[in-house]
Amino acid sequence: MRAVGIDLGGTNIKAGAVDAQGRILERRSIPTGLADGAQAVIARMAGLARELGIEGPLGVGSPGLIDAAGGRILECPN
């Protein structure tokens, strides 16, 4: 199993892949590209997950208010 974690930042999107024991297998970072809009940022995040070979869980960290039950970010300063 290969899980991926993504950190959405105002400047960069950072991501890493870990194995079932939590060992880091790979790390990547790309520009966030906020000026391109939300859909482009989401596409970049998904692309990173695919590049890292996601096979299992995906975790995403984002600043701001999160509606965990609804599965969405309510307010994001980035």
Image (cartoon, helix red, strand yellow):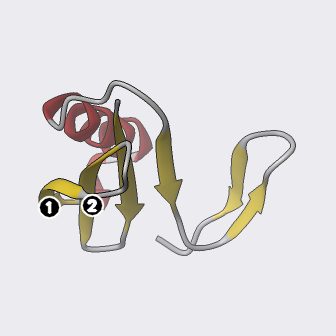
- Left or right of residue 77, residue 51 in this image: left
Q: Name the quadrant of the N terminus.
A: top left
Q: Quadrant of residue 44?
A: top left
Q: Which mark is residue 65?
A: none
Q: Is residue 77 above or below residue 59?
A: below
- Left or right of residue 43, residue 27 in this image: left
Dot 1 and dot 2 residues touching (CB under 8 Å)? yes
Q: Is residue 47 above or below residue 23?
A: above
| Residue, disc 1 | 29
- Amino acid type of disc 1? Ser
Q: Is residue 30 visible?
A: yes
Q: Quadrant of residue 3?
A: top left
Residue 74: percent from left, percent from top: 74, 57
- Amino acid type of disc 2? Ile
Which residue lies most toward the right here?
Answer: 69
Q: Residues within 10 Å of mark 2 (few under 14, many from 20)?
A: many
Alpha-carbon span between mark 1 and mark 2: 6 Å
| Mark 2 element type | strand
| Mark 1 element type | strand
| Residue, disc 2 | 13
Residue 56: percent from left, percent from top: 43, 29
Report the front residue among 35 and 46.
46
- Left or right of residue 3, residue 12 in this image: left
Q: Is residue 70 above or below residue 54?
A: below
